[in-house]
Amino acid sequence: MEKYTNTSGQQERPDIAQVEFTLSGDRLVPAEVTAASGLVPSRAWSKGDSYESKAGGLRTRPFGIWVVTSEGTDIEQCSVGLLAVVEPVIEAIRHIARTAGATVSVGIWWEPEGGQGGFTVSSDVMRRLSELADRVDVYFPG
């Protein structure tokens, strides 16, 4: 990650912003979402897929997931980028979500440089994000 130098000469990292659009559920088939939407997910797996855990050992995914992520240093810009990709194909995605009984969510991850501070999202952009999903989740490190 790129480092920046502040006025006291110390190197700091920039703010970390991520906005994700996620489908999750027991019957979700990620390939169906990809085929219906034409979007390549940032990450995806099916229920029952195996993976190597960070603690070591083989584990099984408890549910399916399909995620598109927009990353940067500004939540508003990441949100607008995500909306540009998802809004044009939302009806196809909603159809798959209904068929699979999947939950649709938008997640906002905000990790400010220096560990404190907030972010701003215009009411129009927040409304549009909310209309995409069943819920909007906000995450902070800690």
Image: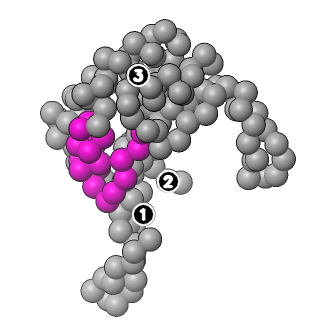
Left or right: where 46 falls relative to 92? right
Determine the CA span between mark 1 and mark 3.
39 Å
Q: Name the residue under label 1.
A: 115
SS category of the residue bearing label 3: helix
Q: How crowded is mark 1: few (under 14 residues within 10 Å), some or many (20 or more)?
A: few
Looking at the image, tell me whether mark 3 or mark 2 is earlier in sequence order: 3
- Closer to viewer: mark 1 or mark 3: 3
Q: Where is residue 50 in the image (x, y as percent from the top left)?
A: 75, 37
Q: Mark 3 points at which residue?
A: 36
Segment tinted magenta in the rendering:
68-84
The answer to whether the residue labelled 1 contacts the one labelled 2, judged by CB atoms less than 8 Å apart, is yes
Q: Does the magenta stretch include residue 58?
A: no
Determine the CA span between mark 1 and mark 2.
8 Å
Q: Quadrant of residue 44?
A: top right
Q: Name the residue under label 2.
A: 141
Residue plotted at (33% across, 57% down): 72
Looking at the image, tell me whether mark 1 or mark 3 is earlier in sequence order: 3
Residue type at the position of mark 3: Ala
